Amino acid sequence: MSMGPTEFLERLDHLLKATDETAELSSITQLPEFYSGSVPWAEQKRKLFDLPRTALMLELEEVKSDQVDRTATFLSGPFFTSKEFPWPHSGEYSWEPIIQIDLARAYITELPDIGSGLLQVWKCNPSDFDSYETRYVPAEAVSTENITPIPDKLLCHPETTHARRAKSGEAPWTTTALLAVEEEEVVSIHDELESYLASLADDWEGPELLVKEADRLRDACADLSVVDGDYFLGNYYPRGYDASLDLLLAQISDQHFYWGDDGKGILLLPDRGDLSSAEFVWFS
């Protein structure tokens, strides 16, 4: 029988607690050394596993701009703009819209409230792949009555944009947007977790019940692993950034976006509730 995400997490938490308790007993063979280096494995384990392990996997669909609520959550389209918050430019360059999040409607029961208003990510310079800005638009400034038209002649450089649908001389975010058409709650499991469970199942001479439970959870890992995909909220596989940070979006190279070979664009909120601390990074 397959194991669902909720059951898996409950059993995993119980196993991790039980192995910690047995490791303190002199009569039990010590847990296998999983990490080498100066940081003890027990500390590494708590850092990795005492984290939210849920996220929303997004299925994206390209839709026409006139069908998009410009105050909603979507990617690579005509974001909300007004006289107070115009479409950004840097000299001759118009900025590329990456992601806009309606914070009030982003709330889910598994995570704390992250506020209201819009959080936008823009690529500032078409030739600079490390040039991004986040912009917060307060809820009181967001109104459909204040929306300004999409500017004419927005620039697009297909060889430097992240949008795969970009074509020469055409800025696709003026005519279409990427909208999340389906959301599914999933478990975000680290690669290290399956390896650790395997080390318990194969190399540990601990209590038989715990060893067998580690083996069962190791087998369940493959079905629940969601290392690849597009995620919204929650926590994500800790590669390239501090694993303790909160995830607002992880955009993986796919049919819609290109972030380099096996690359990822990640929007983080390091201090929950402090919208000014939101940071966008990408790596391949």
Image (cartoon, rainbow, N blue to C red):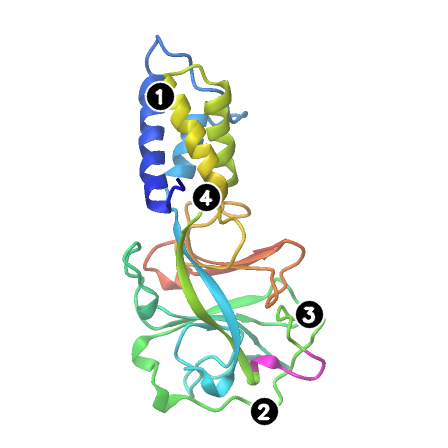
| Above or below 91: residue 227 | above
- Which residue is tagged 4? 189
The majority secondary structure of the magenta stretch comes to: loop
| Above or below 239: residue 169 | below
Q: Which amino acid is tagged 2?
A: Asp
**Camera-side mark, 2 or 1:** 1
State the CA–CA distance, disc 3 to disc 2: 20 Å
State the CA–CA distance, disc 4 to disc 3: 32 Å
Q: Residue at position x 41%, y 24% from top?
A: 212
Q: Which amino acid is tagged 4?
A: Ile
Q: Which amino acid is tagged 3?
A: Thr
User: Looking at the rendered structure, which numbered label has been put on residue 209?
Assistant: 1
Tell me if label 4 and label 3 are in contact, CB under 8 Å: no
Q: Which amino acid is tagged 1?
A: Leu
State the CA–CA distance, disc 2 to disc 4: 44 Å
Name the secondary structure under disc 2: loop
**Camera-side mark, 4 or 1:** 1
| Above or below 100: residue 175 | below
Q: Which region of the structure is painted magenta? A: 167-173
Q: Residues within 10 Å of mark 1 (few under 14, many from 20)?
A: few
Residue 171 shown in magenta? yes
Q: Residue at position x 42%, y 72% from top?
A: 73
- Which residue is tagged 2? 152
Mark found first going from the N terminus, 3 or 2 = 2
Residue 114, x across and y down, in percent: 31, 62
State the CA–CA distance, disc 2 to disc 1: 67 Å
- Which residue is tagged 3? 160
